[in-house]
Image (spheres, helix red, strand yellow):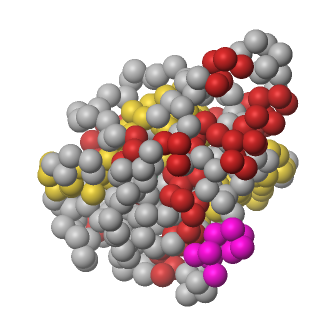
Amino acid sequence: MFVKSCPSWAISESEVTPEHIYINRREWLQKVGFFGLGLASTASGFGLFSGDANAAISGYPAPRNGVYQLDRELTPKEVATTYTNFYEFGSSKNIWRRAQKLATDPWMITIDGLVETEMQLDAVDLITKIGGLEERLYRHRCVESWAMALPWTGVPLASLVKFAKPNADAKYLRMETFFDPEVAPGQKQNWYPWPYVEGLTLAEATNELTFLATGIYGKQMPEQNGAPIRLVAPWKYGFKSVKSISRFTFTDNQPVSFWEQLNNREYGFWANVNPDVPHPRWSQKTERLIGSNKIVPTQMFNGYADQVADIYKGMFLENKRKLFY
Ligand code: MTE
């Protein structure tokens, strides 16, 4: 499914920020009175990493939550922000330039379905309402058997669930990416079931690990990594971590995800990392660390069994494989 192309490691950061995005950032600084507070010099001290440019959510860099430790080096920023999967912008890894077209400020988010009150609100308002930002270091494992280690900034997804007040019938959270083929040319390819959809059970959505990321490497999320807001579920294969979410729907039906619609033999709802269940096309025993190219053993639940194994206790007795794809 994921066609790889050679990533452009060597780009300079100044090439990453188109002018229109830089202007958005200035507008935002004015809107929130940044200049008035005498903080302009801090702002201008930021690098030209695209992630600072469309800054709309304040609080960067956020304090690190030290509970989540890594067993490996962080993936270099230049690698993680130029080697990305975002099929809306094309099926190669090298789409970061094209993704700059995505305008993320303002960004309307719908919360609907089985909730106390359906609502639409801007991503900045949502994050402001549901809590302060924190940084977490997580492993990131793609089903294609490559891996990274990333410093995400964001809020626990559990905070959004609490804010949305789902009713007792809600069992799942369905998350959907924007749909705009004029901006995202991949969405003109009508053999894909756009928009990109993913889902979690509410037990998964409210697990302590499950994160709504608004930033990476201490700054606002660059478009290619899923600005302004994306899921991070580090014990699952990366395709579960839907980018640029525009809608959260609480439902009693198990959502059918984007890749599952295309090929449910290879990409199931659960998609929990497990070295003992090979994918039809990739053994999952080991993973290649993007950046160093080191090969390391893959861990059960991507190393997060302590946090998530309980969710699945007693489930899938009839078909263990189902738990993983
Ligand atoms: N979300 C959307 N909307 N579109 C995508 O193509 N790709 C997924 C996931 N989320 C994807 C997406 C896949 S296959 C992976 S591995 C991760 O995003 C990659 O995240 P990264 O590019 O930030 O490493």
Q: Residue 145: image x %, image y %?
A: 26, 61
Q: Which image quarter is the C terminus in?
A: bottom left
166 relative to 42 in the view: left or right: right
User: Please, which residue is most extreme toward the top here?
Assistant: 38
Q: Residue 226: image x %, image y %?
A: 56, 52
Q: Residue at x 57, y 69 (%)?
A: 88
- Front-lying residue, 18 or 85: 18
- Can residue 185 be found in the magenta stretch? yes
Q: Residue at x 79, y 19 (%)?
A: 35
Q: Which image quarter is the N terminus in?
A: bottom left
Q: Quadrant of residue 131?
A: top right
301 in relation to 264, above or below: above
Please provide the residue range marked out in magenta.
180-188
- Can residue 272 be found in the magenta stretch? no
- Res 212 visible: no
Q: Residue at x 53, y 48 (%)?
A: 15
Task: Count the numbered circles shown.
Answer: 0
- Res 292 visible: yes
264 relative to 164 in the view: left or right: left
188 relative to 167 in the view: left or right: left
- Front-lying residue, 28 or 210: 28
Q: Residue 282: image x %, image y %?
A: 22, 70
Q: Residue 266: image x %, image y %?
A: 35, 76
User: Please, which residue is most extreme toward the bottom here?
Assistant: 191
Q: Quadrant of residue 52?
A: top right
